Image (cartoon, rainbow, N blue to C red):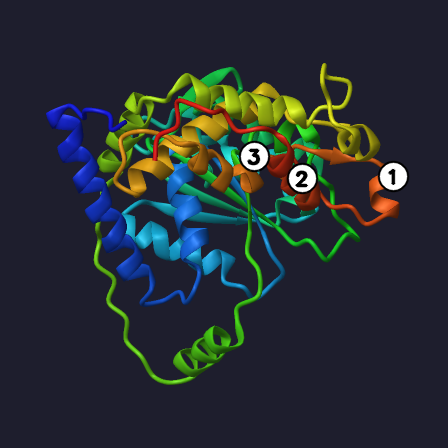
Amino acid sequence: METQIPVDDSQLVEKLRAGHRDILREIRKVIIAQDDVIDQVMICMMVGAHSMITGVPGLAKTLIIKTLAQVLGLDFKRIQFTPDLMPADITGTDIIQEDVTTGKRELVFVKGPVFTNILLADEINRTPPKTQAALLEAMEELQVTVQGETYPMASPFFVLATQNPIELEGTYPLPEAQLDRFMFNIIIDYLEEDDEHQVITTTTTPRHIQLEKTLSGQDIIDYQKLVRRVPAPEAVSRYAVALVRGSRPGQNGDYDFIREYVNWGASPRAAQYLMLAGKARALLYGRFNVSIEDVQALAYPVLRHRILTNFHAESQRITTEEIIRRLLETVPEPKSGLTT
């Protein structure tokens, strides 16, 4: 059953769809064959959440985010995380500054790179936990506290953190509590052969690319409010909860493969993000209602960093991807209340 869309929201949905098409058109001038990754980042922004981006070096993780920031007309900053990076290098610090007219000295706060719209935290697992934690207040509370003074963040504000999955030496894996604050773990994989050939061809010849700005920061804020107005049938929300609860060993009615391979399952925050991300995906496809298919399509990026496997799984090379696949096959879909 189609949901009746209020007139104002209907216009906003059409504007969003047009903006989405414009964004893809502009980014395709620079990025080849990564539409799914771009859509997931867009969904993250529409929800007002943060994402982890995982991929080996050379797959254009930084370029995708930088290009998206240009197309959206948002301020963009990048922090290269290293073992000697300090919290003040992220948040900013107080310095003593002298007034040239009066000669009086006073403490002045100099903002760090976290004060931006899109922050790329490059190789976040290369810095110690104390510095990683400097981002937590900004991510959760949209503010930074230095020397007892609180400074609000820009709006909109997104953290997109990258990790290199093949280098473990000299890294500091993020604690589970911090990983849980990222809505998505987006995987960027190698391109197909033809797409990779196109990348090589286009990037080794002269070219001049002119990107046009499409959506504004205020548009993104409006879409974040719109996402929360999208209705969801009870059957869909219960399905999202069932998926998340099904990932936990020891939960009533848990599954054999979960008890065998999983130490810890996903938190309630995962179900919240499944619903919000599903609503945002529905809007991108021009629907003012969320469906089972929306939830299923986003189960992997929402759950893959929230399910902790045990030694038994590692010894049998059972990955979280395999566990999520089996969850989607095992958790029964509701018989009614679906919208497509």
Q: In the figure, 9 relative to 125: above or below? A: above
Element at label 1: helix
- Residue 176 visible in image: yes
Tell me which label, 1 or 2, sits earlier in the chain: 1
Q: Is residue 141 left or right of residue 29?
A: right
Looking at the rendered structure, the kind of residue marked 3 is Ala
Q: In which quadrant of the rendered image does the N terminus lie?
A: top left
- Judged by depth in the image, the label closer to the viewer, 1 or 2, is 2
Q: CA distance from mark 1 to mark 3?
A: 38 Å
Label at residue 311: 1
Label at residue 135: none
Looking at the rendered structure, the kind of residue marked 1 is Phe
Q: In the figure, 313 relative to 198: above or below? A: above
Q: CA distance from mark 3 to mark 2?
A: 44 Å
Looking at the rendered structure, the kind of residue marked 2 is Arg
Label at residue 88: 3
Q: Residue at x 36, y 22 (%)?
A: 232
Element at label 3: helix
Q: Quadrant of residue 207?
A: bottom left
Q: Which residue is mark 2?
A: 326
Q: Position of residue 251 (x, y in %)?
A: 72, 17
